[in-house]
């Protein structure tokens, strides 16, 4: 089974994904890291050098060309499901879980660690919350196509594993 974790930046896809994969004895793949390794640049550096449209093209390619093992938990960049028919591809190739959180909770989590996230670099306080609200409004239509939607507050890998075994 291939499990794709989707959701906004700061929703816990990477942290929960790594723990979930360990519990299930699955391989863990972080597509942002795959992309960074491929271009030998951090995502922030890539954005600065080549811009967002080029990044989006590349992330769609990485999604499709990564050699996935039979069983894997895959964490995706927050914008990935929302362009280039990527959500269609994910639905055709795996089980998707949307980790859902409110803009306020996301903003609290994202206030630290913004340097790594080029889309957030110049945003603070209310401007950060407004930015997240607007982006989530655009993205919700894609995220909500996931097979499973879970509340990300106090979410644990154990709970994710329980949810997955219930749908299998
Ligand atoms: C992005 C999310 C990031 C990364 C890039 C763009 C987005 O991934 O792909 O900075 O558009 O939401 P995370 O969701 O893992 O932070």
Image (spheres, rainbow, N blue to C red):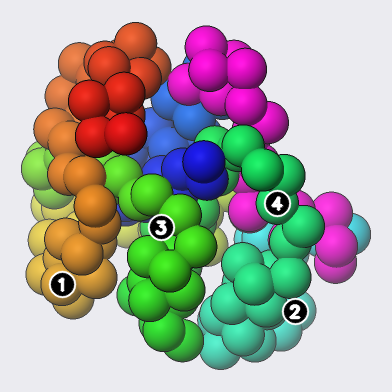
Q: Position of residue 167 (x, y in %)?
A: 24, 34
Q: Which residue is mark 4?
A: 68
Crowding near pointer 4: few (<14 within 10 Å), some, many (20+)? some
Q: Earlier in the sequence, mark 2 or mark 4?
A: 2
The Cα–Cα distance between marks 4 and 3, rounded to whole angstroms, is 20 Å
Q: Which residue is mark 3?
A: 78
Q: Which residue is mark 2?
A: 49
The secondary element bearing badge 3 is classed as loop
Q: Nearer the viewer, mark 4 or mark 3?
A: 4
The Cα–Cα distance between marks 3 and 1, rounded to whole angstroms, is 13 Å
The Cα–Cα distance between marks 3 and 2, rounded to whole angstroms, is 20 Å
| Quadrant assignment, res 143 | bottom left
Q: Which residue is mark 1?
A: 141
Task: Tell whether position 27 is magenta.
Answer: yes
* Magenta residue span: 20-39
Q: Is mark 2 within 8 Å of ligand 1?
A: no
Crowding near pointer 3: few (<14 within 10 Å), some, many (20+)? some
Find out whether the residues at labels 1 and 2 contact each other: C-beta distance under 8 Å.
no
Q: Is mark 3 within 8 Å of ligand 1?
A: yes
Main SS, magenta residues: helix
34 and 116: which one is in front?
34
């Amino acid at each position: 089974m291939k499990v794709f974790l989707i959701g906004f930046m700061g929703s816990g896809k990477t942290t929960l994904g790594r723990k979930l994969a360990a519990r299930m004895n699955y391989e863990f793949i972080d597509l942002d890291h795959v992309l960074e390794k491929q271009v030998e640049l951090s995502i922030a550096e890539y954005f600065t050098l080549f811009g967002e449209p080029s990044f989006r093209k590349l992330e769609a390619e990485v999604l499709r060309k990564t050699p996935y093992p039979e069983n894997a938990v895959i964490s995706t960049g927050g914008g990935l499901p929302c362009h280039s028919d990527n959500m269609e591809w994910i639905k055709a190739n795996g089980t998707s879980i949307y980790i859902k959180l409110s803009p306020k909770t996301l903003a609290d989590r994202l206030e630290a660690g913004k340097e790594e996230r080029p889309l957030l670099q110049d945003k603070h306080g209310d401007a950060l919350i407004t930015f997240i609200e607007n982006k989530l409004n655009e993205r919700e239509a894609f995220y909500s196509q996931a097979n499973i939607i879970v509340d990300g507050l106090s979410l644990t890998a154990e709970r994710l594993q329980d949810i997955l075994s219930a749908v299998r």
